[in-house]
Image (spheres, rainbow, N blue to C red):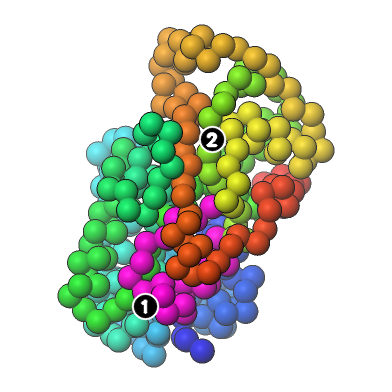
Amino acid sequence: MANILLTGGSGFLGRGLMKRELYQRAVLVGRRPVACNKFVEMSLDSHADFRSVLIDVDVVVHTAARAHVMNEISPEHSSLYREINTAATLNLAKQSALNGVKRFVFISSIKVLGETNIDNKPFTHLDPLNPQDTYARSKAEAEVGLRQLSDKYDMEVVIIRPPLVYGENVKGNFKKLLVLCAKEIPLPLASINNKRSLVSLNNLVELITICTSHPKAANQTFLVSDDFDLSTSELLTSIALAGGFKSKLFRVPPLLLRFIFFCIGKMSTYERLCGSMQVDINHTKKILDWRPLQTTSDGLSECWPLTE
């Protein structure tokens, strides 16, 4: 069985991974202690020396990152994203390659391909990089650098690009949707007819685990989802239903809704709510002979009750 080094064990995804015995035996690296077999406290940056924690490691699973935060557009934020998501990733990957690590699994983001689908065509693993903000650019630059390292050194690289991830103790934008549904606030979103992909924490954890050892995962890029896409209105209704609340959506003509968001200077919010972001996971299913096991309804149920 492979010896694994895991970063980001205290984060949302990391906590999901830590429920598996495989990662309980892993070496965990990070700034916040995690209950596990071996935790090493250290900063993940472009200057860190990882040699001591890479001894006898076969696979690195790199989930640590500066998470995407809306409206972070200043030069300072841009440099932080690049330092943590790009430079630190490539520093760890290069040292991994030089110390005999066989495989590096990198959790990227679907945002490296863009914010919304073009001509309603779902994203595929073959689409060109098209990042639209500093977070997405930092992830895209890390992907490019990892491919270059893989070409130069004898280390396999696996890149996984998840869309919106949800599950127990979810944070960020998805938690904001939970709060809105719990308050049963009327929202003018019933007429939205888009499609968006999302992935439950359990389905993503399962895919990552497969990618640590599957021989066909070597040097591949995988998109992941529940393979069940929803419109924004369907998602809000499903979230409310899973939590035992009533969905109070009402209809506003899409053009009027767009005009309202334009007038208040929130077009980026409009695109996230009303634009489509579907992913095609046929490549992932075919190469790995994998299917998402958890249904979206079951995954949404695990988001409740709300936690602090």
Question: Is residue 206 in the magenta section?
Answer: yes
Question: Is residue 125 in the magenta section?
Answer: no
Horizontal side, residue 58 vs residue 184: left or right? left
- Residue 179 place in picture, x, y as percent: 67, 34
Can you say whether 192 is above or below 25 in the image? above
Check whether the beta carbons of the residues at disc 2 and disc 1 lie within 8 A of each other: no
Taking depth in this image into account, of 77 and 68 the one nearest to the observer is 68
Residue 42 in sight here: no
Residue occupying the point 46% across, 38% down = 277
User: What is the spatial separation of the Cα atoms under label 2 and label 1, in whole angstroms?
Assistant: 34 Å
**For residue 247, what is the image quadrant?**
top right
Taking depth in this image into account, of 113 and 263 the one nearest to the observer is 113
Q: Amino acid at mark 1?
A: Arg
In this figure, which residue is indicated by the disc labeled 1?
A: 103
**For residue 104, what is the image quadrant?**
bottom left
Horizontal side, residue 170 vs residue 130: left or right? right
Tell me which segment is drawn in magenta: 204-225
SS class of the residue under badge 2? loop
- Residue 188 place in picture, x, y as percent: 62, 17
**Tag shown at residue 195:** 2
